[in-house]
Structures are given as structure tokens and as C-alpha cells.
Image (tube, helix red, strand yellow):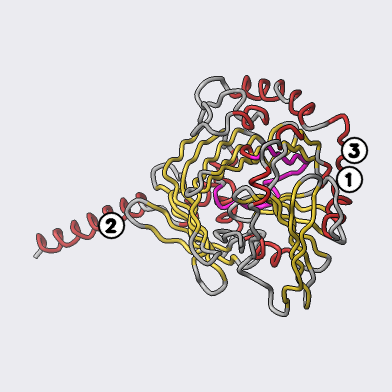
Amino acid sequence: MRRFKWAVALTLCLSLVLSGCGLLGKKDAGSVVRELDSIVNKLDSYHAEGTMTLNTGTEPQEYSVEVCYMAESYYRIALTNAKKDITQIVLRNDDGVFVLTPHLNKSFRFQSDWPENQGQVYLYQSLVQSILMDNERQFTTDDKSYVFDVAANYQNGSLARQKVWLDKKNYAPQHVEVSDTNNNVMVVVKFEKFEFGTKFEKDQFDMQRNMTGWDMKTLPTLGHDHEGDKAGAADTQGTDKAANGQATGDKAASGAQGSDSKASSGQAGSANGKTTDKSAAAGNTNKQQSFGIIEPNYIPSGVKKQDTTELKLGEEKAVMLRYSGKYNYSLIESRPQEKTVSILPGDILDLGFTLGVVTGDDKKTLTWTYDGVEFRLSTGDLPVTEMIKVAQAVQGEMGK
């Protein structure tokens, strides 16, 4: 009898020990969140590659995404249309934020605290912050991942929640799904590569380097230490100022909004305070003649298309689509052939497939490029969420 009692007691003790070991080896949401907080606060650099799929149009659109980050405020993000092999690059360095469209020789430059003031689904900091900030976060695990279901915090107000899969070994992001208020998955990001502590070349975040080397699959990453990188990136920015018309920056900035409003009313002129190289436009007459109208597949409720007008933006042919009703706005489309540099007093607006630039106060103009076409959406009353929907609705649409 005593042996039996002793065996039972031993079994219970072993069970408690094994159970305790299991508990120690299993992390709960609180412990994972604390470790994430520590990681993001000490984050030095990382390099990520992946695929982003947007389900915001009539059919899914796929983009290759590459992200380079170096503390504390250097960013390089390349978004490439998988089918058309067209790349747009977003940079942040000591001189500000740049939105580059290299194949059009076009760049926007302005001062902004982006991306601190805006979440981005492909940025590690944004994903971690969404987890840290949601006190009602949902937490599960699978064989290889910690999975968080949290509130989404993006400019597009229709995106409500997101699920984030993190590698159990090092907390690197593996997969992200962002859903709307009806639980429809609108954005999916699959990270194929994610590396902490990447060493970058000094010109990785240089504007001129990215404008001339954009057709490379990726810029060199291995090389200098971080302190040397920062100094080198700062030293090479002098050429950016000259390239972007820094000497006439005030005139360009003040003329940006005026040129947008002139274009919206059908008047000819140089838009967005551009400086142009007319020789770059030579021999492009055929492309101008074959210009097609791209009509967004989305129109806000209570709005109807009013008319379509052909106009000129400098030497370039353009069309303007006007919409009226509950909201009133115009959409100008052109295929710029000239080398252009724009200095805009505006803010970045995340469109998902690219980043746009918003200028103006009472009357706002959203400018972005897609598939070689420059779009300018001007309005005095269209909400930002609706502007994003209209902009996203040109994806995959063919010129008529």
C-alpha cells in the first residue's frame, strides 16, 4: 500500500515537473509582445524581399517588394509591378523623402516624417507597432509561427484588421493578411527573405544612385559599417540638391499647387513646378498620338462622370475626366516623356501599389504614376479614403 502511495506521489511530482517545463517552454502573448518591444527599440537595420498582392481592383495585382532599413531614419522601398517590370522607389535620407519613377526620369521630393506618421504593411516597425498598440490583440501559434490578429492602422480607412505571422526563432515577419470591415482579405504580403543586421553600401539610400541604377535587380548591400554608411549617404546628397533644383526650390514649391489647379481647369502649363529637358521628349510623337484614356472602375456612390476633355500640359497631350454629384473631382492623365523634377510642399499618401503625393489645402491634388501614366486627381470635397479608392481603381485598366 505504501509502495502504491509512493508511486502515485512520484507520478504526480513528475507530472508537475514536466508540466512546469512545458509552461516554461511555451510563450504566451505577453512574453512575445515584450520581446517584440525590445527588438524594435534596438533595431539597427534589416533587408526584406517579398510579394504583395492587392485585391482592391477587379482582379488581383501582384508586386515585388524590397525594403532596406538602416537606423534611425534611412529607408529604401522598391515596388515592382510583377507583370510589367516597372519599378517605383521610395527613399528617405538626410535630405528628405523622395518618390522616384526611374523609367520616366521623374522624382518628387519633399520634407516629411514618413513613415513614422503612417503605417506600411511591408515595414517591420509598422507590423510590430500594430501588435504593441492593440490591447485587445488575439494570439495563436502554429508549428513555426506566432500569429497575431490585431487592428489595422492604415490611411485606407476600409482596412480594418490584419493577421501577422512571425517566425518563432527570431520574430521575423513571414506573412501578413489585411482585411476590410467585411473580413475580405484585401492585401497579402509574403516575405520570402528577411535579414536583421544587414550591412549596406553608402549609396544605397542616395537619390541619384537609385535613379541611375534602378534597373538592377537589387543594389549592393554588403560593405561599409553603419556609421560610415550614414556619413557617406549624407556626403552624396549634395548632388541631389542640384538635381532637384534646390536653388529655385521656393518658386517650384509655390508653383506646384497653382499648376495643378490650372491643369484641372483645362489650361496649358508646366505642372507641379517641373523643370524639363525637352530634348528627352524628341522622337516620342508616336507615343503621344497613341495615348489612351484609362477610366477608373470605381466611382463613389452619388457621383457620375460629367465629361472628358483633351488638353495640353506644356508640350504633352493629356485628357481630363470630370465627375460631379455628391462629390466633385477631376482626373488628369498624361504620359510624360520629358525628364522632370518636382519639389512639392505635400505629403505622401499610401495607395497600396505605389505612393502618391498630396498637395493643397482646401483643394487637394493627388499625383501618382502607374504603367507610364501620370495621374492627377483634384478635388475640393472628395474624402481621402475615396481618393485612395479612385486611385486604386486604375490598376489593370487598359487605355480606351
Q: Which residue is mark 3?
A: 250
- Sequence-wise, the earlier of marks 3 and 2 is 2
Q: Quadrant of the C terminus?
A: bottom right
Q: Position of residue 21 (x, y in %)?
A: 31, 50
What residue lies at 59% left-to-right and 55% top-to-bottom? 352
Which mark is nearer the camera, 2 or 1? 1
Q: CA distance from mark 3 to mark 2?
A: 72 Å
Name the mark on residue 16.
Answer: 2
- Sequence-wise, the earlier of marks 2 and 1 is 2
- Sequence-wise, the earlier of marks 1 and 3 is 3
Helix, strand or loop for the magenta stretch, by majority: loop
Q: Position of residue 328 (x, y in %)?
A: 79, 70
Q: Which residue is mark 1?
A: 255
Q: Residues within 10 Å of mark 3 (few under 14, many from 20)?
A: some
Q: Position of residue 304 (x, y in %)?
A: 72, 76
Which mark is nearer the camera, 3 or 2? 3
Q: Residues within 10 Å of mark 2 (few under 14, many from 20)?
A: few
Question: Residue most toward the bottom?
Answer: 302
